[in-house]
């Protein structure tokens, strides 16, 4: 059962509508919203739909036409997309949600189908979140990964990233950036439903990374 209390009614209704469209058949929900719906740890406010179909085959014109035909309000930049396109969809300009539609690397796990919603699995989301951390994570990325520490070790998280991104995986850089909060400190705190605070999350991440580094597995 999904944790619908983590999203607005508008986001839920928009997501359910998108999942019925053939234009989105190859897409699944990824990122913080997918994770929040699955584990219920924080509120999330946007929709990230990713597809791993061959590069250049996503019909962005068809997607835009579908959105304009099915939502009272649609806004987007009228530029040719490269790997993806961002929209705002909803009822009005002040009652809309952000929708990102993107091509991605090949998924490493089957999708989950719950309540007609196609979701990336938790291991898939971990691999994608770790990739963001490798490039410089934001507060919500650290928040999401920390929420999974009870079920996944640092070693497992690194292995998932290496499986999904074998050619760009850099364990040393990931471990370094996993405890670099300089950029994330200035971000707004997510609305946490588990009563956690940013300072606690940072301290716990540092503790886990240091413990990992002190084992023989801490060096790659």
Image: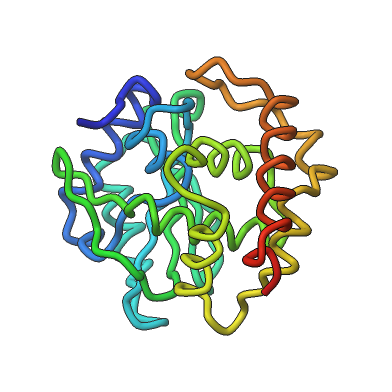
Question: With 175 as the anchor, is 64 left or right in this view?
Answer: left
| 118 over 187 or under it: above or below | below
Residue 148: x and y in percent read: 48, 41
Residue at image position (55%, 60%) is 155
151 or 77, nearer to the observer: 151
| 34 over 12 or under it: above or below | below
Asked which colour scheme the image uses, the reply is: rainbow
Residue 208: x and y in percent read: 66, 44
171 or 24, nearer to the observer: 171
| 217 over 75 or under it: above or below | below
Number of numbered discs present?
0
Question: With 25 as the anchor, is 203 left or right in this view?
Answer: right
Question: With 30 as the anchor, is 183 left or right in this view?
Answer: right
Residue at image position (24%, 58%) is 111
Q: Quadrant of residue 195?
A: top right
| 155 over 169 or under it: above or below | above
Residue at image position (41%, 34%) is 36
Residue 123: x and y in percent read: 39, 56
Quadrant housing the N terminus:
top left
Residue at image position (47%, 37%) is 150
Q: Quadrant of residue 135?
A: bottom right
Residue 97: x and y in percent read: 45, 35
Quadrant housing the C terminus:
bottom right
């Amino acid at each position: 059962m999904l944790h619908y209390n983590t999203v607005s009614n508008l986001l839920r209704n928009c997501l359910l509508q998108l999942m019925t469209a053939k234009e989105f058949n190859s897409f699944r929900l990824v990122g913080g919203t997918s994770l929040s719906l699955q584990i219920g740890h924080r509120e999330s406010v946007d929709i990230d739909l990713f597809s791993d179909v061959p590069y250049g085959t996503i019909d962005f014109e068809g997607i835009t036409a579908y959105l304009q035909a099915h939502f009272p309000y649609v806004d987007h930049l009228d530029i040719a997309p490269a790997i993806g396109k961002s929209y705002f969809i909803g009822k009005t300009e002040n009652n809309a949600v952000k929708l990102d539609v993107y091509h991605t690397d090949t998924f490493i796990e089957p999708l989950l189908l719950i309540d007609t919603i196609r979701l990336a699995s938790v291991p898939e989301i971990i691999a994608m979140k770790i990739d963001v951390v490798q490039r410089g994570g934001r507060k919500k990325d650290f928040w999401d990964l920390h929420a999974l520490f009870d079920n996944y070790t640092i070693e497992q998280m690194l292995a998932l990233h290496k499986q999904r991104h074998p050619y760009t995986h850099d364990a040393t850089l990931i471990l370094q950036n996993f405890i670099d909060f300089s950029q994330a400190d200035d971000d707004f705190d997510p609305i946490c439903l588990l009563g956690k605070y940013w300072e606690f999350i940072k301290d716990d991440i540092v503790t886990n990374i240091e413990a990992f580094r002190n084992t023989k597995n801490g060096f790659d």
